[in-house]
């Protein structure tokens, strides 16, 4: 919406009107989107928290029978309002609608994915709160919802003659050209894997105060750079990256998520006054999966979002090893004291703040490593 203000500078005779020319630049609008989302979060955060408390939408904490010693560490968090992800979603949507170009169809695709995954998470949170347990919707239902979002994204790219050729290619970090030129309709399955994996990985990371929000900031910052580069023909050619003329505008939405996450972290830092819940974590994860597809940096998400990947792998390893040893030896054995892995370190004696800050540091390093691949091709 604000983009069109640059038209006031066309043919303007005074310096005042020529100043509106700045609204056409993606870099300016990206920073403005981040500031807008951040300020809106600060302005509305307290009201959202009070509303969640009045509705008695408190986070259910798993019992000692379920998590043993961890219940002693997290018992004080019972009743902290959840579904705070509505604050992130709301401020990202408002900032994006204000500052991103409304004639860019991929912006709308990204906002659709964010909203759809957020609604799926909201349903999950609502069931947890209403039933006062940590069950929520079934894993199968969650996967079906995420797969439906992936199907829409795949249909957008694979049925568009102008996009389908490059969309079906598979690009790998450190390589100049695509590893596979044409994945065919297998690209739809690949997109589903990226979106479902990313959505669930962020969801698993959201277990400590501010952990997921902090890692979201670094990952979104990295993808704001990657989308800007992918949408700039000269830079993309110089760095030998796939070019999409629409991709640059996605950096505005990525920066809106950065600002919203900073604003949410204001209230979510330890000790948290609100949790994002699945409303926020599933939405953010789905967002990263879709934005990675939109700039053809899907596999790079494994590097940039390294902390999310680590969390998801720890759960996969723990479950697989437990099932294997139970079948082989009659009783399940564990690799970690508890998964996701941030709980393992808590049970090892690390303070919650120590785990959070160290994982943030890892997330920054992963983002920097991912950006470094731009020159290592």
Image (cartoon, grey):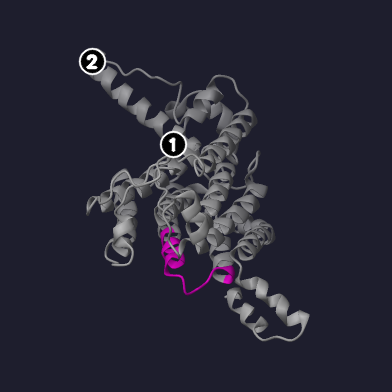
How far apart are the alpha carbons under marks 1 and 2?
Answer: 28 Å
Magenta stretch prevailing secondary structure = helix
**Residue beneath the point at 52% across and 37% down:** 207
Dot 2 crowding, Cα within 10 Å, few <14, some 14–19, many 20+: few
**Residue beneath the point at 54% across and 70% down:** 97
Question: Residue 344: horizontal and vertical position, in percent?
Answer: 50, 24
Question: Residue 280: horizontal and vertical position, in percent?
Answer: 50, 51
Q: As drawn, is 137 to the left or to the right of 33? A: left
Question: Does the stretch in magenta take in 182?
Answer: no
Circle 1 or circle 2, nearest the eye: 1
Q: Are marks 1 and 2 in contact (CB under 8 Å)?
A: no
Question: Bounds of the magenta span?
Answer: 98-113
Q: Residue 65 or 203: which is nearer the viewer?
A: 203
Question: Residue 57: horizontal and vertical position, in percent?
Answer: 53, 52
Which comes before the other along the chain, label 1 or label 2? 1
Secondary structure type for disc 2: helix
In the image, is residue 57 above or below residue 76?
below
Residue 133 seen in this snapshot: no
Using the image, tell me which numbered label, if any, was put on residue 309.
Answer: 1
Secondary structure type for disc 1: helix
Reading the image, the residue beneath label 2 is 328
């Amino acid at each position: 919406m604000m983009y069109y203000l640059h038209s006031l500078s066309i043919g303007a005779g005074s310096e005042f009107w020529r100043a509106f020319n700045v609204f056409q630049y993606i870099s300016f609008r990206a920073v403005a989107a981040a500031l807008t989302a951040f300020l809106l979060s600060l302005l509305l955060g307290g009201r959202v928290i009070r509303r969640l408390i009045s509705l008695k939408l408190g986070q259910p904490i798993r019992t000692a029978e379920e998590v043993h010693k961890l219940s002693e560490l997290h018992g004080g968090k019972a009743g902290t309002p959840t579904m705070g992800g509505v604050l992130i979603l709301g401020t990202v949507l408002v900032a994006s609608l204000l500052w991103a170009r409304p004639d860019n169809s991929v912006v709308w695709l990204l906002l659709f994915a964010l909203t759809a995954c957020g609604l799926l998470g909201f349903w999950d949170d609502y069931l947890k709160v209403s039933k006062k347990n940590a069950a929520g919707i079934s894993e199968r239902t969650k996967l079906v919802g995420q797969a439906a979002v992936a199907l829409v994204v795949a249909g957008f790219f694979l049925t568009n003659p102008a996009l389908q050729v490059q969309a079906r290619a598979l690009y790998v970090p450190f390589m100049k050209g695509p590893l596979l030129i044409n994945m065919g309709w297998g690209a739809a399955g690949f997109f589903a894997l990226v979106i479902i994996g990313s959505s669930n990985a962020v969801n698993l990371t959201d277990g400590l105060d501010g952990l997921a929000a902090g890692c979201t900031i670094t990952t979104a910052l990295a993808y704001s750079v990657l989308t800007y580069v992918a949408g700039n023909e000269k830079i993309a050619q110089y760095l030998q990256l796939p070019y999409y003329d629409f991709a640059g505008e996605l950096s505005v939405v990525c920066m809106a998520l950065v600002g919203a996450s900073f604003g949410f972290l204001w209230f979510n830092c330890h000790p948290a006054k609100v949790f994002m819940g699945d409303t926020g974590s599933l939405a953010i994860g789905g967002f990263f999966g879709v934005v990675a597809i939109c700039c053809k940096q899907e596999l790079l998400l494994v590097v940039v979002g390294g902390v999310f990947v680590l969390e998801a792998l720890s759960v996969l390893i723990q479950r697989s090893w437990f099932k294997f040893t139970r079948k082989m030896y009659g009783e399940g054995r564990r690799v970690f004291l508890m998964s996701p892995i941030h709980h393992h370190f808590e049970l090892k004696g690390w303070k919650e703040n120590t785990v959070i800050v160290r994982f943030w540091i890892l997330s920054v390093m992963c983002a920097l490593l991912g950006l470094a691949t731009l020159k290592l091709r």
